[in-house]
Each structure stands twice: as C-alpha cells, then as structure tokens.
Amino acid sequence: MTVTERKWWKDGVVYQIYPASFKDSNGDGIGDLNGIISELDYIRSIGVDTIWICPMYDSPQVDMGYDISDYENVYPPYGTVQDMERLIAETHARGMRIILDLVVNHTSDQHAWFQESRSSKTNPKRDWYIWRPARYVNGVRKPPNNWLGNFGGSVWQWDELTQEYYLHLFCPEQPDLNWENEETRKAIYKSAMEFWLERGVDGFRVDTVNMYSKGEMGDAPITDEGSEWQFAGFQYCNGPRMTEFLGEMNEILEKYDAMTVGECPHTPDPARVVKYVSAKEKQLNMVFQFDVVDIGQGPYKFQTTPRDYTLPQFKSAISRTQSIIHDTDAWTTVFLENHDQARSITRFGSDAPEHRIPSGKMLALMCCALSGTLFIYQGQELGMTNFPMEWDMSEYKDVDSTNYYKMVAARTNNSEEALKAAKASLQHLARDHARVPLSWSTGPYNGFSPADTKAQPWMRPLPDAEHCNAKQQQSDKASVLAFWKRMLQTRRDHNDLLVHGNYADLDPENKDLYIFSKTWRGQKAVAVCNFTDSAKALALPEAVANSKRELLVSSVDGCEEGKLAAYEGRIYLLA
Ligand code: TEU
Ligand code: CA
C-alpha cells in the first residue's frame, strides 16, 4: 500500500455556503457576508472545519456570480472587500479555514478585460479571449464549429462590432479566457488568486478546472440528430496543456500552502482523474468527479424521468470515486450535494414526510463512512429537500432550468405533454432546489431575512420550515442535524478507518442494500445502508456475518439486531 502524507485538508470537513441564500442580514432579500459572519458559530457547531464561499465577487449575476466582472471586488449586495477581510479573520479566529471559488475559465462579458478585447481586432487584449472568423456554408454565416454549450445553444456568439465569433462554453455573457496566452494567465493568477491569497484565504474550489486547455476545435460527432449543436465535452475538457497550466498555478498555491479542489466534469476515465490528483504530479489536491451526481440524468441532463437509475449504478459511481485512492498517492472527495445539484434526500433517499428524517440520517452515515475530504452543502445538515411540484415555473430562476424549458417548448411546438415532463424533471434535478433560502426558523421568511423586512427573498422559501429548520434542530436530539454532529464526531474518532481506509463494495448487485467495508492496517468496519422504504433482513455477506462485530452506530435508536428499518444505516466494527 502506498503510504500517503497526512495533510490538513485530507481530514477536513468542508461546509459550502451559497451567499445569496444563506442569511440576509439587512433585509434586502439577498443573503450577504454579514449574514455569514453572524452564523459562523452555528457552522462551527456542526463539526466542520472549513468553509467554502461560492462566488461573492462583483458580477452582473447572469449565472449567479459565476460570471465575474471584477475579481478584486465584492458584489455590492453581499458586502465589501473589508467585509471579506472580516469574514476571513472571524473564520480563522474560530479555528476554521476558508476557501473561495476560483472561476477563471471565463469572465463576465462586463469584465474590463473583455470590454477591451471586443473593442477592436487590434486591441492588445484581443487575444485574451477566443475569437474566430465565421464559416460560410452556401453563403450562410455559421459558427466555427457545432459545439453545444453547457446551457444549450451554440458555444459561439457573433460580435457585430468586429465581425467575429467568441467562444463561451456557458452563457453568452461568460466568454472563455484564452489560456494559451501567457500574459492572460499571469493576469489571472495575480487578480483572481494572489489578491485573495494575500488576504489570507486557505485555498480554492476551482471551477471547471479541466476546461482551460481546449483540444482540437473541430466539429463534435453527431449524437443528437435533431439539433444543430452537439455535445463536445470530450473535446473542450482535459486538453493537451492542462498539466502545464495546473503546474503553473500550483507553484503559486504552494507558496501559501493553499488547498485546491477542482471541479472535473466530463471525465469518466479514472486514470485521467488520478493524474490530476496524484501528489507527485503537483496539479490539484483533489477533484469533484461527476460520477455520483450525474446518476439518473439524461443525455441532455434534464431529458429524463425522476429516479431513472438503480442502486447498483449509484454504488458503482461511488466505487469509482473511492477507488482512485486505492494503492495510489491520490486523494478523493465525498459529496452528494452542491449548488448545482438538487437535494440528496429527494434524489437518493425519500422526501415523503415519514422518510425524510430517516433517509437524511442514513445518507449522512454513508457519507461519513466514505474516504476522502467530505463536503456538506448548506441545508444538507438539516435534511432540506427539493421544493414541491406545485410551485410554478416562475419559481425556477436558474438559466440552466429556464433555457431547458424554453428549448423543449421550441422543439416540441409547446407540446403540453412534453412541457409537463420537462417540469417534472426540473422538479427532480434542477439546480434551483439548492438555491432557496436556508430554513433558519419558523418565523417570517423562515428566518432568512429579518422579520420586519419588506423585500421578498430572491427565491421563495420552502413551505415545510415548520418541520425542518435550524433553530428547532439545534435542540432536538432526534434531528438530522444532531445526527450529522454525531456522525462527524464518529468520523473524527475513527479517522484512519473512515477518512483514509480502503473501500470495498461487498455486494454490488444488491438492489436494496449498500454494504461496504473500510479497512486500515488490520482494523475493519462495515457500513450497511437500507435504500428502501421498508424493513429488510440484515443480509450480511458470509465473511462479515461470521466474524465478531460490534455496532458502532445506527441511524435508528434501539435498532433491531437482524433487521434494518426503512432507510436505516449502520456501521459495525469487526474484530
Ligand atoms: O459548473 C460547471 C459544470 O460543468 C456543471 O456542473 C454545470 O452546472 C452543468 O453543466 C449545468 O448543467 C460550474 C459551476 O459550479 C456552475 O454553478 C456554473 O454555472 C458553471 O461552472 C459556469 O461557471
Ligand atoms: Ca442582504
């Protein structure tokens, strides 16, 4: 076995904060930095040791701050750079660390760099973005290739002024930076990284980290006959200069002992993933693979029906993320939620009233038993779920959702049936579900905004705060929150086994139960999770059934020896 070095970020548990929806301190309906500062003690009480702040930079908010117009300023409704300095200091004062989102594949079209770049073909910053002339087919102007963007449509936007197209893998308002240009890279490092490292941040979650180096820009193969634009993720991700670019970034990060977790979409090959996160490669500390969160999605993400996956598929996705640290010097992550995903209870457990709490606890137990750095998304610790089917389409604010709905409408000539299916899919998978205000209490606006506020929160608060809110759960020993706290303590108490141990799925084909083992130098634990809504016999594989075992923890109080309750999870220590 490769013995890997222990680093603070390996044993860390990270709590992800979405500034717009965490806590609104001044009653304008938008969360803010003062709101985050006011709840740092709450965050710390969960038992996490690092916070990750989603983009709080200045931005026109076309894609909720992932379209940055100034890396060195804060979006005014969130606060100021001084507020950020205070947040960093207050976080450190509580013995926690803080990481920021580093979004440098693209900027906003309102960033000064792009404004210059688009102003003329001879502007010194022209080459800082990716400009190409049109192609003409039978005299008709066409973009340089057929690539489909992440939010639908072509990745190319025609710019009238200089009569060329620019590349945008996301919204047209998010032009891709040209990483081939050395001067651009230096400017990115200085403005987006060093500015904040100098202010004491402890690292970055690196957005779309594998898209900086694009591969060949030829047409993508046709996988969607009815469309002019084709999936090209395998062409614009993991290009030939990725290693070089990440090496450069790493040189800066190392100076500050800063950690990185890169977002790594469209990379199913584990060997490629290991190259990003192997310690000796000096690229990234860890990445978010998409294997687990992509489960049940269609070719067009939302082009599917709710729960279109099997438990064996879910388990095998987790196995792929666990296996990359087996006999390597690589490191991995554990997460079921983030701001781009619907709620995990709704997707992988059950949000039926009688199952919400049990399945929330079971998923917490599962996460805490897996190896790697653990990430929890705000509200996950409370067992928050997706918003209801009855909510109107106007409650969906995310461009990913609204673009999809518009596309279905256009492609089916407003077919009622197709639009109903699209909405059902969005109710299950849309990013919006993670972005509603955190349910703090049963008060007005679920305690997200001050009670005397006039402005409505920017997204509608959940209707079930009466059953699920932070205030109530803090004093309820049977709550999802109380169970997360207990599990995080258990994870700390058994750090070798639970955070670093070798993982094995003991019964991959089992459609009801997830049974996996963790081993570390002679120590062994087995986790058993019932993913169904009915009781199941505790059917342990022979080798485990025959060895002496001691119950470490169950998600159910007074659990029955040979029988798992609906959505019960357990961990046994084996002698
Ligand atoms: O996401 C990049 C990404 O590839 C997906 O997770 C993306 O959300 C999906 O393709 C949409 O269907 C990152 C951020 O996490 C996301 O919030 C941003 O919208 C995106 O980059 C652009 O910056
Ligand atoms: Ca506010």
Image: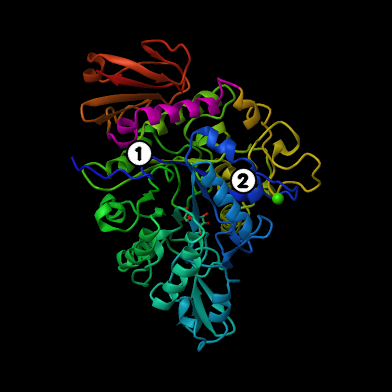
Per the model, the C-alpha gap separating discs 2 and 1 is 31 Å
Residue 499 in magenta stretch = yes
Q: Residue placed at 48% from the left, 22% from the top?
A: 533
Query: The magenta stretch spans which residues?
Result: 476-502
Spot occupied by residue 460 in the image (x, y as percentages of width and height): 70, 43
Q: Is residue 439 above or below residue 170?
A: above
- What residue did someone put label 2 on? 36
- What residue did someone put label 1 on? 318
Asked which secondary structure carries label 2, the reply is helix
Q: Is residue 93 above or below residue 574?
A: below
Disc on the earlier residue, 2 or 1:
2
Residue 323 in magenta stretch = no
Categorize mark 2 by other alpha carbons within 10 Å: few (<14), some (14-19), many (20+): many
Q: Relative to 67, is 328 on the left or the right? A: left
Q: Is residue 246 above or below residue 158?
A: above
Q: The N terminus appears in which quarter of the rendering?
A: top left
The amino acid type found where label 2 is placed reads Ile
Marks 2 and 1 in Cβ contact (< 8 Å): no
The amino acid type found where label 1 is placed reads Ile
Spot occupied by residue 396 in the image (x, y as percentages of width and height): 64, 49
Asked which secondary structure carries label 1, the reply is helix
Q: Relative to 95, is 420 on the left or the right? A: right
Q: Residue furthest front?
A: 93
